[in-house]
Image: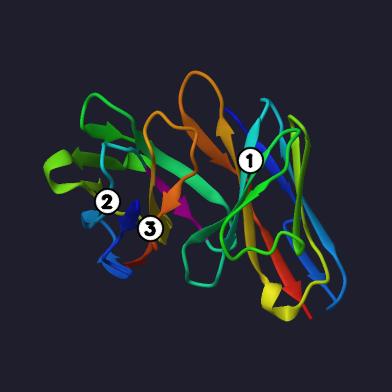
Amino acid sequence: AQSVTQPDIHITVSEGASLELRCNYSYGATPYLFWYVQSPGQGLQLLLKYFSGDTLVQGIKGFEAEFKRSQSSFNLRKPSVHWSDAAEYFCAVAPSGSQGNLIFGKGTKLSVKP
Amino acid sequence: GAVVSQHPSRVICKSGTSVKIECRSLDFQATTMFWYRQFPKKSLMLMATSNEGSKATYEQGVEKDKFLINHASLTLSTLTVTSAHPEDSSFYICSARLAGGVYGYTFGSGTRLTVV
């Protein structure tokens, strides 16, 4: 069965520091990959997505993610974190070429300290 | 871009009553919508897949008689929590799959349901 693992439940970084949130997936083929951000009590906002092509994907708010097939990973990065980035981040996958639903990881809560 | 409008954003209801949550696709036709439930500090759990004009497909363990889903038009899907109990209190989010062209999903802003 497909699954998504976000090994870090909670990460705290200092404002201005770099950030990397980890995501690993388990799937027979290369799925479609997504990162979403959720502020408290809000819905989900798409940060970026990967379908095919260039394995380094640029998203909104200065985020990027790199797909590494050999590691089944799709880690999210940001070179300099802002206090407004504090939120919950979800990695998600969908089977490529299908009409299926998204499968979410358990999320990583990001806290930013001044 | 594609927008899904979800209402209400918050609702408090008494035990035993029913609550309807609406999701509307504002500028596109959503043939398929997904309904998720999110427990505090937990990930999103898919409850059901709603297809326009047909019965919803429920995930294992989700009571279809309790969580009624209707997708009567290409722009509206509703989730009705019937005979609500405090354990139904949760955050419910709908999502529409974008058809044609770029493959992706868009989410509603969520509904915080509190059953007292």
Q: Quadrant of residue A49?
A: top left
| Alpha carbon separation for disc pair 3 and 2 | 11 Å
- C-alpha span from label 1 to label 3: 20 Å
Tell me the quarter of the image containing the N terminus of chain B: top right
Specify the farthest residue to the left. Answer: A70
Residue at the farthest top position = B101
Report crowding for label 3: few under 14, some 14 to 19, many 20 or more residues within 10 A (C-alpha).
many
- Identify the subunit bearing mark 3: A
Which residue is drawn at the image coordinates 73% and 73% (left, top)?
B114
Q: Mark 3 points at which residue?
A: A105
Query: Dominant secondary structure of the magenta stretch?
Result: strand
Is residue A75 or residue B68 the one in the foreground? B68
Please tell me if label 3 and label 2 are on a single chain.
yes
Please give the range of residues in magenta. A34-39
Q: What element carries label 2?
A: strand
Q: Position of residue B45 (x, y in %)?
A: 52, 60
* Viewer-side label of 3, 2: 2
Q: Name the residue under label 1.
A: B33
